[in-house]
Image (cartoon, rainbow, N blue to C red):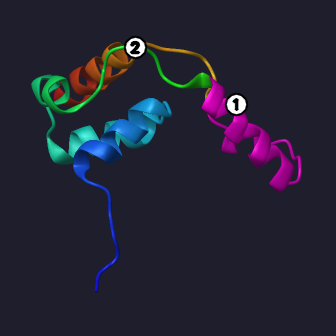
Amino acid sequence: MGLPYPSLESFEQSLLDTDDMVSLTDLVDGMGLTEEWGLRHLRVEGENDAAWAEQKNEKIRASVPATEDSYLLELITTTGFLLHAFGVEVTVTQD
């Protein structure tokens, strides 16, 4: 029995939905993903879930002592368009 792991599509979608651009860039670059792949396999219409990110940040703040660096653990809570975010990451890694 192995450990369960998400499919590439669901993992990539979660990075996109949570605006985790560093991990998204690493995955796109490491896997050699193209914009066409993203359009075929991901839900890129609409916006990321900023409300979810804010809820996650509240839990982080409640569980970690406040320091001058603790803000680095928090997620970005601005709303952005998913297609633009994926397209930017693909373009950056293909250059």
Q: Which residue is mark 1?
A: 54
Q: Please give the name of the residue rendered at 19% of the width and 28% of the height, measured from the top-left corner.
A: 38
Dividing the image into 4 quarters, which one contains the N terminus? bottom left
Residue 37 lies left or right of residue 19; in this view the side is: left
Q: Distance of mark 1 from mark 2, alpha carbons?
A: 18 Å
Query: Residue 26 placed where, x, y %?
Result: 32, 43
Task: Point out the image quarter for the C terminus.
Answer: top left
Residue pointed to by mark 2: 46
Magenta segment boundaries in residue numbering: 51-75
Magenta segment includes 71: yes
Does 62 lie within the magenta span? Answer: yes
Q: Position of residue 69 (x, y in %)?
A: 78, 44
Residue contact at pointers 1 and 2, CB within 8 angstroms? no
In the image, residue 12 sits, relative to residue 80, either above or below, namely: below
Q: In which quarter of the view is residue 12 placed?
A: top left
Q: Position of residue 13 (x, y in %)?
A: 34, 37
**Displayed quadrant of residue 24:** top left
